[in-house]
Amino acid sequence: MVIDYSKTETEKAILVGRAADSRQRAEVDASLAELGRLSLTAGATVVAKRIQTRAHPDPATFIGKGLVAELKEQLQTDGANCVIFDDTLSPAQQRNLEDALEAKVVDRPILILDIFASRARSRASRLQVELAQLQYTLPRLTGAWVHFSRQYGGIGAKGPGETQLEIDRRRVRTRIANLKALLKKLDRQRSTQRKGRQAMFKIALVGYTNAGKSTLFNVLTRANVTTADMLFTTLDSTTRQMITRHPCRIVISDTVGFIKKLPHQLVESFKSTLEEVSLADLLIQVVDCSAEDFEQRYVQTRQVLADIGADRVPYLLVYNKIDANLDFVPPSLGSAPSFLVSASKRQGIAALQSELVARSQKL
């Protein structure tokens, strides 16, 4: 079944998070705020947020029966038609919640996959996102999901979600194998391109989504990569030569932004794209210093870098958006040298460029 999105009603969502204890509620509240931004990016309107303090998830419904009953009533009261969970739900938990709430239920991984599906532009990124979606969907491929896809549409039903849920597991596995073969072919093309840059000093921009990597990339290379104040504007790696007054051979790669609770299927399928990071001579880790939880975002980025084998690559810390936080004082986050910049205002760029040139000349 193909869904006509032009007729799909705007989704009104209730966000749900779980705190293991009262001390964790502030952290979960911040995570729900980010989930709200993700929901907005996906095209949903958030009408309410709920946090349940519970030591362990309920095996059947993740949350307790009391909150399930309250959510069902709140869906009607607020005119909502979707519940988005900040954590990963098992296939059984998702089906049970849909039955109990009589509404669409999605979790954070589905939401992120959905955003990636709508943002993918290049052939490589579309293939990578489809692979991640199918790998996530495969264990959930049941009659209940076919009904879910037909009845609700909207978030979680983009890309292969429209049609692949209606075919059997064997055909999905075949499609997954085909996608992996196609991506391997693209991987060989990337390897050929990298050989042409072996004599260059290779830098990769990394960081949390919406930290300002693409804006900094444009400033350093005079490129025209799309920038916007929203999550996951960049999905495709772009490589350009850095522009300086000095004779140098520096190439910089802009990469996809990271986020906490990033679906491991996405990390796996995007590994070939992220190889630009692990093979770089230097990383520039961009941190949005105007974000209240910037230290947590730094830690999360370091974790993803470890997952892709890039945590041992030398790096600089670039605290971006200082124009929005004039009193910012850099904390001690590792031993990497740090720079304060505003990429949008072109502040602090000269010192960063000088450091990059100096490092390239040591290669």
Image (cartoon, rainbow, N blue to C red):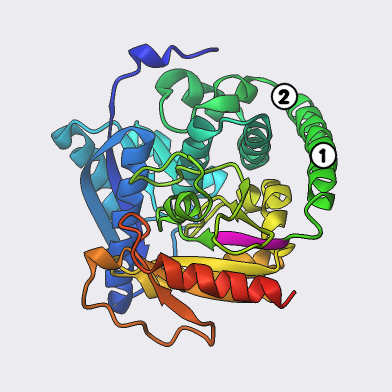
The image quarter in which residue 297 lies: bottom left
Q: Is residue 58 left or right of residue 128?
A: left
Q: Main secondary structure of the magenta part?
A: strand
Tag of residue 168:
2
Q: Is residue 73 left or right of residue 330?
A: left
Q: In this view, does 261 lie to the left or right of 203?
A: left
Q: How far apart are marks 1 and 2 (CA)?
A: 32 Å
Q: Closer to the camera: disc 1 or disc 2? A: 1
Q: Can residue 310 be seen in this view?
A: yes
Q: In this view, does 249 lie above or below 133?
A: below
Label 1 environment density (alpha carbons within 10 Å; few <14, some 14–19, many ≥20): few
Quadrant in the picture for the C terminus: bottom right
267 or 341: nearer the viewer: 341
Helix or strand or loop: what does disc 2 sit on? loop
Quadrant in the picture for the N terminus: top right
172 or 121: nearer the viewer: 121
Q: Reply yes or no: does residue 202 show up in magenta.
A: yes
Residue drawn at 42 percent across, 65 percent down: 349
Give the residues in magenta. 201-205
Q: Is residue 342 above or below residue 113?
A: below
The residue that label 1 is drawn on is: 189
Q: Which of marks 1 and 2 is nearer the N terminus?
A: 2
Q: Position of residue 198 (x, y in %)?
A: 81, 58
4 or 91: nearer the viewer: 4
What's the amino acid at mark 1?
A: Gln
